[in-house]
């Protein structure tokens, strides 16, 4: 029968327990502890070597399992149970879970967080959670729904500012894809990012979704979505590729399509490119057809509105119908477009270098010391009694963290400031307002045919 060992004092020791045997000695330069039974801890344990137990590791909780001088993991009143699925309470949310290891020193083959559908588990990491297999297999991060019924798996990004709402221009989430260059250095490949665009409402946050890709030299914003439309940024004609794939692209703010049937056609979809002719001055709203064929070596620019006007004169029939609508202030429209271009240029700089180095005197502030306390509160949960066909309220208790002010103050880094121990330098997280463009985009201009019809 395995025995249970209780430790109520703080020791640094070498310890081996067989059936009925227990010993403790003062600290050694390299110490280990092996327990074949349960290990119950009332206070701290510090061991310079391995801690091995064949039973349960438990305590009144929360207690700390320390590796060296750093608190690596804080456990609740649960236990480590070899060979079974365990639930680990990571204690205070201020602690960091940096790396999870399986018994062989690698990341666990399967990480299960409360797979019982009635529980809803939470895995919290304050830094990077890395899936890095050492054998020739993929590194999938899989979200699977195992519960019967109308439920589905999903991956959620949640930007939180404590108790306050998110703010305009907050980045709500980013997915990035990297590969290695010829020197073996990770390099950017593509990005999907979302940011708040406007003040929050009572139920939803106005959001833009953007797609960025790179070639061998630069990163490009291809398109982004807002709640009204898909926006395509001006790029180059992708050219004809005999792959059966049709393409949409934007050049100089105009939308084009390339056929995927190997015909080498590229056609303007927004009908206002008067390249090979000038519309008649009395044409109130000229529109055109423009297309080219690379294989034939020709392009065409047809005056469609002009042709219909002449057809009306010859036939006496009406084909063009006009109706006045409320005019938009074109100066304001151009200014809004210019501001969007400036903001987009700043966002690209911010993504490329989100931090800037600052001096020590600018990095700290005096702040009140706040300690974490724990209080017990009651709450109500409901259980379903199918025998009595009723829902039963059940009063339970839980431990809740709270801030305790002790009237003391200390120097600390300002919010958004990071110290890099590898370089000894301090960095501040930048904002859009702090970025100054060396070469801001030029203000957009209206086409001349539009200016001729709206006046100066």
Image (tube, helix red, strand yellow):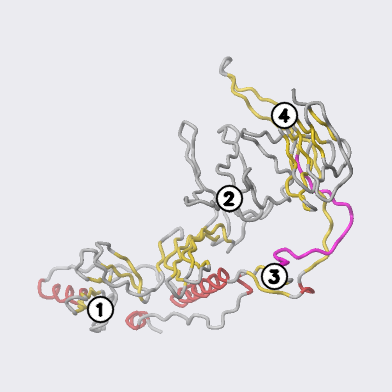
| Circle 3 residues within 10 Å: few <14, some 14–19, many ≥20 | some
Please tell me which of labels 3 and 4 falls first in the chain.
Answer: 4
**Which mark, residue 427?**
3
- Residue 5: image location, x then y, percent: 81, 31
Please tell me which of labels 1 and 2 falls first in the chain.
Answer: 2
Tell me the residue that label 4 is attached to. 396
State how far apart marks 4 and 2 are (Cα): 31 Å
Q: Is 391 in front, or is 264?
A: 264
Q: Is 285 in front, or is 222?
A: 222
The magenta segment: 400-422
Q: Secondary structure at mark 4?
A: strand
- Residue 363: image location, x then y, percent: 76, 70
State how far apart marks 3 and 1 are (Cα): 59 Å
Badge nearest the viewer, 3 or 4: 3
In the rendered image, residue 229 lying in the magenta stretch gets the answer no
Image-quadrant location for residue 270 = bottom left
Residue drawn 78% across the image and 26% down it: 19
Q: Is residue 206 above or below residue 83?
A: below
State how far apart marks 2 and 3 are (Cα): 35 Å
Please tell me which of labels 3 and 1 falls first in the chain.
Answer: 1
State how far apart marks 1 and 2 are (Cα): 48 Å
Tell me the residue that label 2 is attached to. 202
Q: Is residue 393 above or below residue 291?
A: above
**Which mark, residue 283?**
1
In the rendered image, residue 414 lying in the magenta stretch gets the answer yes
Residue drawn 58% across the image and 50% down it: 202
Q: Are marks 4 and 1 in contact (CB under 8 Å)?
A: no
Badge nearest the viewer, 3 or 1: 3
**In this rendering, would 55 be left or right of 119?**
right
**In this rendering, would 348 be left or right of 272?**
right
């Amino acid at each position: 029968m395995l025995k249970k060992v209780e430790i109520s004092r703080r020791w640094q020791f070498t310890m081996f327990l067989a059936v009925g045997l227990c010993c403790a000695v003062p600290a050694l330069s390299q110490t280990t502890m092996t327990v074949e039974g349960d290990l119950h801890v009332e206070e701290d344990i510090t061991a310079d070597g391995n801690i091995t137990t064949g039973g349960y590791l438990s305590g009144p909780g929360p207690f700390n399992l320390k590796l060296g001088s750093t608190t690596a993991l804080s456990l609740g009143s649960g236990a480590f149970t070899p060979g079974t699925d365990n639930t680990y309470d990571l204690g205070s949310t201020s602690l960091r879970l940096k790396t999870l290891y399986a018994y062989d020193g690698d990341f666990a083959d399967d990480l299960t967080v409360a797979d019982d559908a009635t529980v809803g588990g939470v895995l919290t990491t304050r830094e990077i959670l890395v899936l890095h297999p050492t054998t020739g297999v993929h590194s999938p991060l899989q979200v699977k729904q195992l519960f019967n019924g109308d439920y589905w798996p999903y991956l959620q990004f949640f930007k939180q500012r404590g108790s306050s709402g998110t703010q305009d221009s907050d980045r709500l989430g980013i997915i990035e894809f990297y590969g290695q260059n010829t020197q073996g250095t990770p390099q950017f490949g593509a990005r999907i990012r979302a940011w708040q665009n406007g003040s929050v409402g009572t139920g939803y946050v106005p959001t833009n979704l953007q797609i960025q890709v790179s070639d061998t030299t630069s990163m490009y914003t291809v398109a982004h979505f807002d709640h009204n439309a898909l926006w395509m940024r001006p790029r180059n004609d992708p050219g004809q590729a005999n792959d059966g794939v049709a393409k949409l692209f934007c050049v100089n703010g105009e939308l084009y399509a390339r056929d995927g049937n190997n015909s080498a056609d590229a056609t303007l979809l927004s009908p206002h490119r008067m390249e090979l002719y000038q519309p008649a001055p009395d044409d109130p709203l000229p529109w055109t057809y423009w297309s080219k064929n690379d294989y034939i070596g020709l392009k065409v620019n047809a005056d469609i509105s002009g042709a219909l006007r002449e057809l009306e004169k010859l036939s006496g029939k009406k084909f063009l119908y006009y109706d006045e609508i409320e005019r938009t202030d074109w100066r304001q429209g151009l200014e809004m477009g210019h501001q969007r271009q400036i903001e987009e240029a700043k966002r690209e700089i911010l993504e490329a270098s989100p931090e800037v180095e600052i001096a020590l005197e600018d990095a700290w502030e005096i702040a009140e010391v706040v300690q974490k306390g724990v209080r017990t509160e009651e709450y109500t949960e409901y259980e379903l009694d199918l025998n009595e066909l009723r829902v039963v309220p059940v009063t339970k208790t839980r431990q809740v963290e709270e801030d305790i002010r002790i009237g003391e103050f200390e120097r600390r880094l300002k919010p958004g400031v990071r110290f890099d121990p590898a370089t000894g330098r301090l960095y501040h997280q930048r904002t859009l307002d702090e970025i100054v463009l060396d070469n801001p985009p030029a203000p957009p201009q209206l086409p001349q045919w539009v200016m001729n019809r709206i006046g100066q």
